[in-house]
């Protein structure tokens, strides 16, 4: 079928008009996004400016001469994941298997910190432990990602953010006197604190209420000279503990269906290994930056540990959704030691129900 010159010109003009219309539409979307992002950044800055840092406690070792059992330094690790601050779960709804509230979240988190301090003192009878690594892997607030959460949460997301930051600041502040140095590794991108209906890819680490939790937490701890705070507004990050490299994830990107998704996790570890191996082979100097020995994550609310990956339990424990699906997991959080020669040792999943009443 042939066209006259005028018909071709007309078609060309129509196509140009349509392309201009699409470009204008994209400009409108981009402008709206930038405006919303600007509002969020202003909100973050105002919240941060209102923070009064926590005053540090006196070191428990001040004026004491420590008798070290070994010259080899062993490093302690604790993982904080899935606190779900703001969530409410009535015990009657799930046959008394569990209950949850902001007060219980506070008590369990503080109980966990105190237990780690006692657990460390116990291990100091054998090991030289000066440094603690606090690995935070997300879902620290309940958020508004489901309609039922919006209805049943104790308070809105902005309040959850502040309460979560305060709670975890108390944890670190309580532990600070027991160590010469604490390194906090805060991974931002998670599931419950996202601000989009579906998980996003680009800028997911900053378009998140959890980013604000991290920024507030860092501000609360500013006066603690022995606390190093690292915040990572990204999906995954390799962090070093003694001679081991851990790849931190939240875990929401792992394909799953009911219970612990062993196959999904294995596939994720394999894909990460393959991708990072290619980078290392092209640039060997980046080996320590992107290579890893083990993947650590949360999200599935159940503690488990293998040679290649480990999952933390949750502060919340069993809720109505878990109970309806026939799943049960007691609230727990893990801690362990890393020896420079022998690797991981003494992994403990602290059971947190004991601290429900403070």
Image: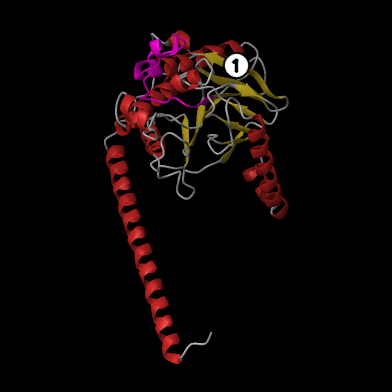
- Mark 1 crowdedness (10 Å alpha carbons): few <14, some 14-19, many ≥20: some
Whether the magenta-drawn stretch holds residue 81 is answered as yes
Q: Quadrant of residue 255?
A: top right
Vertical side of 283 occupied by 356: above or below: above
**Residue 212 at what x, y percent from top left?**
37, 38
Q: Secondary structure at mark 1?
A: strand
Determine which residue is flagged by label 1. 348
Q: Nearer the viewer, residue 300 or 249?
A: 300
Q: Is residue 244 visible?
A: no
Q: Nearer the viewer, residue 185 or 150?
A: 150
**Residue 65 at what x, y percent from top left?**
54, 14
Q: Quadrant of residue 132?
A: top right
Vertical side of 249 occupied by 307: above or below: above
Q: Which residues are magenta?
A: 79-106
**Residue 182 at what x, y percent from top left?**
50, 28
Which residue is located at x 45 percent, y 86 percent?
8
Q: In the rendered view of the protein, which quadrant contains the C terminus? A: top left
Q: Most extreme residue toward the bottom, as rendered?
A: 5
Vertical side of 207 occupied by 95: above or below: above
**Residue 215 at what x, y percent from top left?**
38, 37
Q: Quadrant of residue 100?
A: top left
Question: In the shown orientation, is residue 83 left or right of residue 78?
Answer: left
Q: Nearer the viewer, residue 233 or 245?
A: 233
Q: Nearer the viewer, residue 35 or 72?
A: 35
């Amino acid at each position: 079928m042939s066209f006259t010159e005028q018909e071709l010109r007309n078609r060309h003009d129509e196509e140009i008009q349509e392309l201009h219309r699409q470009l204008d539409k994209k400009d409108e979307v981009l402008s709206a996004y930038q405006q919303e992002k600007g509002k969020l950044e202003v909100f973050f800055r105002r919240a941060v400016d209102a923070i009064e840092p926590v005053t540090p406690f006196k070191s428990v070792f001040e004026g004491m001469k420590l008798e070290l059992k070994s010259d080899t330094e062993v490093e302690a690790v604790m993982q904080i994941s899935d606190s779900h601050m703001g969530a409410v779960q009535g015990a009657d709804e799930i046959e008394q298997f569990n209950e949850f509230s902001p007060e219980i979240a506070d008590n369990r988190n503080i109980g966990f910190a105190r237990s780690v301090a006692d657990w460390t003192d116990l291990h100091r009878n054998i090991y030289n432990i000066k440094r603690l690594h606090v690995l935070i892997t997300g879902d620290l607030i309940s958020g508004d990602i489901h309609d039922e959460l919006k209805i049943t949460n104790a308070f809105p997301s902005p309040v959850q953010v502040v309460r979560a930051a305060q709670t975890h600041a108390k944890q670190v502040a309580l532990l600070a006197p027991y160590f010469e140095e604490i390194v906090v590794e805060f991974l931002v991108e998670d599931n419950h604190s996202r601000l989009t209906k579906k998980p996003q890819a680009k800028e997911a680490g900053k378009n998140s209420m959890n980013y604000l939790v991290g920024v507030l937490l860092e501000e609360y701890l500013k006066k603690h000279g022995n606390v190093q705070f690292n915040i990572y507004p990204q999906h995954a990050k390799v962090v070093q503990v003694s001679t081991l490299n851990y790849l931190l994830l939240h875990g929401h990107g792992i394909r799953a269906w009911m219970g612990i998704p062993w196959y999904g996790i294995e596939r994720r570890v394999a894909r990460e290994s393959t991708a990072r191996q290619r980078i290392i082979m092209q640039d060997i100097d980046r080996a320590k930056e992107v290579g890893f020995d083990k993947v650590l994550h949360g999200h599935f609310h159940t503690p488990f540990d293998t040679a290649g990956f480990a999952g933390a339990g949750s502060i919340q424990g069993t809720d109505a959704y878990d109970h309806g699906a026939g799943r049960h997991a007691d609230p727990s959080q893990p801690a362990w030691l890393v020896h420079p020669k022998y690797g991981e040792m003494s992994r403990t999943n602290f059971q947190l129900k004991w601290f429900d009443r403070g």
